């Protein structure tokens, strides 16, 4: 029943499939790919420095993390602050805009936990 209420609130009636597909594509454009959501999750868990973010995400390369962080900064998902310490330090933080993905990320984590056996083929 909860899903029906949510659908009525979000979807137009009559349904406009082109609008729905465009909205999905826009969302995927901003947070799609293998690494963006894990990076957002890492930063939201308190990892602010490049190496801390990298260590928290198994398998991500330095080059890929650097590229993703630049793209995420351009898309206003994160901010990059450079401190004139010696040596120079850089910190990344999620923006309020980025935090709007919180419910989506939580729902995806919940779904992944609930369906782990089916996904991995174990069980």
Image (cartoon, rainbow, N blue to C red):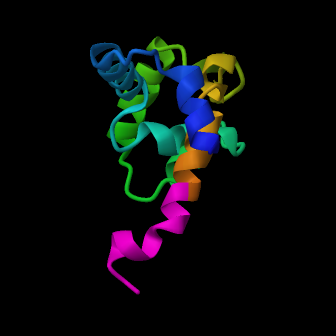
Residue 122 placement, left or right of 85: left
x%, y% of residue 48?
66, 36
Quarter of the view holding residue 66: top left
Return the residue found at the far left: 18
Quarter of the view holding residue 31: top left
Identify the residue at image location x=44%, y=59%. 58
Identify the residue at image location x=67%, y=39%. 44
Q: Nearer the viewer, residue 17 or 65?
A: 17
Q: Is residue 60 above or below residue 68?
A: below
Return the residue found at the far bottom: 123
Residue 120 inside the magenta-drawn segment = yes
x%, y% of residue 49?
62, 38
Residue 77 inside the magenta-drawn segment = no
Q: Nearer the viewer, residue 3 or 123?
A: 3
Q: Is residue 24 above or below residue 54?
A: above
Residue 70 placement, left or right of 45: left
x%, y% of residue 20?
36, 20
Magenta segment boundaries in residue numbering: 111-123
């Amino acid at each position: 029943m909860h899903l029906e209420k949510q659908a009525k609130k979000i979807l137009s009636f009559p349904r406009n499939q082109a609008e729905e597909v465009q909205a999905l594509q826009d969302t995927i454009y901003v947070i799609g790919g293998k690494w963006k959501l894990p990076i957002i999750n890492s930063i939201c868990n308190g990892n602010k420095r490049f190496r801390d973010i990298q260590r928290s995400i198994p398998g991500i390369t330095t080059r890929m993390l650097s590229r993703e962080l630049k793209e995420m900064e351009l898309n206003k998902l994160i901010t990059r602050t450079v401190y004139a310490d010696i040596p120079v330090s850089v910190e990344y933080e999620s923006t309020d805009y980025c935090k709007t993905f919180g419910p989506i990320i939580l729902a995806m984590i919940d779904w992944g936990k609930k369906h782990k056996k089916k996904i991995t083929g174990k069980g």
